[in-house]
Image (spheres, coloured by chain):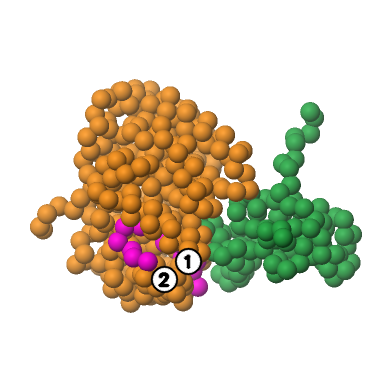
Amino acid sequence: MKDLPAEARDLDGHPVTPGLPMAMLAEVTHRCPLACPYCSNPVELTRAAAEMPPEDWARIFREAAALGVLQVHVSGGEPGARRDLAQIVASARAAGLYVNLITSGIGITRARLEELDQAGVDHVQLSLQGIRPDMADRISGHPGSWGKKMAFAGWVAEIGFPLTINAVVHRQNMERLPDMIDLAETLGARRIEVATVQFHGWADLNRAALMPTREQAGFARRVVNDARIRLRGRMVIDYVPADHHAIHPKACMGGWGSTGLNVAPDGTVLPCHAAASIPWMRFENARERSLGDIWRLSNSFNAFRGTAWMPEPCRSCERKTVDFGGCRCQAMALAGDARATDPVCSRSPLHAQVVARAEEDAAAVETGFTYRRMKKGG
Amino acid sequence: MNAPARPAPLIAAGDIPFLPRGVRLEDDRVRGIRVLQAPERAMQLDAIGDAILSELDGHRSMAAIARDLAARYNAPEQRIAGDMRDFLTGLIERRMVFLRDRP
């Protein structure tokens, strides 16, 4: 294990100033009964044998709270795949963190949900792959998922947890967005997150089957705008638009290493859940050193902090502290260079090419998926 | 239309506001601030916001709370009521404050 640098410097050696993280994504497992073709987990999934025990999670939660983290998103994979989930949740609450449970709703019984209530889950976010059994089960690759999710949502309401519906939209379900919003309202959700698929990792393998058309992106925007007016004060709608059709890139993570961190099932600490897609980047492990040291001093977190690392056109752009040059992982995937201007930005020299490729993918007749699954054996 | 339209208030004087399950006021000891914790959101509160939210007990109406705060801080009740209406409307929009059902 090499020592960490003594000072915080970006990838060019410019001094940077780490702030305080607000939120931590805790991927407690990569096991999942679903096989969604746009899963945000890395293509190289962590196996059950490499998962950290609850004692390690408890220590990491205490370190996170001491570092300034206020909220933890207990996620996966499907966090319910861990039998000791309630113990993990209880330790996060004991550390003083606000606990969001991010779940597919599959594999958590009513009795376990009550146990999670006792353990201190503050809020439940339930994923939605589509509307009605045929669509939801096909996209999630899990027959029966729809029925199980609807039962789960009923228990969430009975126990009284605040509920967020997370609806991931793409070319094959975008037309049903109005129904998804109606469903969230019927289920008593306080919020719905409408998130257009982000094309990294698994989703990138399924671009031709998932890429929305420009018309669909416009449709979704109108549906969201109308619903926000109609549902004001009743349900919040958060919207992640299709950025391949945008003018400016999204301010990924609110700036690299600025507000959030992600801990993988084996303790690897990443600046974002997709950061492992940057092949040259090396990551530290929270079992080997403290989260505070990793946050402040690791090369991975400091690489893209501040703005001194930026190339043109970002360097002279007035939006450089608004969208931070966009997403580093998307720059890696589309430009082959993690420090490039995110090519979805209209000011990127690669923009026209990226749009042309998105339109080509959107026009594809492909509907079959490469489902997210762990490799057999190994 | 000259000035931008202010969004319609979502709370009236007689309404009883409260923090629903999953929303709580806390000290952020690391930053030395008060925060409102809610589903996937943490909001920094200034002294006024903290004073208002600390009063939400699920029993008193907004008007009654405005009266109490006006007496305690020796401030005009009408201004406090206006501040409360705007602040709470913003939080009702975010589903961080609920209103008791009227009988």
Pinpoint the chain carrying mark 2. Answer: A
Chain letter for mark 1: A
| Residue placed most toward the observer, B60 or A242 | B60
Q: Residues within 10 Å of mark 1 (few under 14, many from 20)?
A: few
Q: Left or right: B38 with respect to A376?
A: right
The residue positioned 51% from the left and 60% from the top of the image is A162
Rendering coords of residue A2 (x, y %): 27, 65
- Residue A293 lies within the magenta run: no
- The quadrant of the rendering that contains the N terminus of chain A is bottom left
- The answer to whether mark 2 and mark 1 are in CB contact below 8 A is yes
In this image, A188 relative to A36: left or right?
right
Which region is colored magenta? A96-110
Residue A194 visible in rendering: no
| Residue A159 numbered mark, or none | 1
Name which residue type carries label 1.
Ile
Task: Pinpoint residue A114: horizontal percent, then vertical percent.
Answer: 41, 71
Q: Secondary structure at mark 1?
A: helix
Residue at x-position 28% and y-position 73%? A53
Most extreme residue toward the left is: A377
Give me the disc on residue A114: 2
Residue located 18% across and 53% down the image: A374
Asked if one can make out residue B26 in the rendered structure from this viewpoint, the answer is: yes
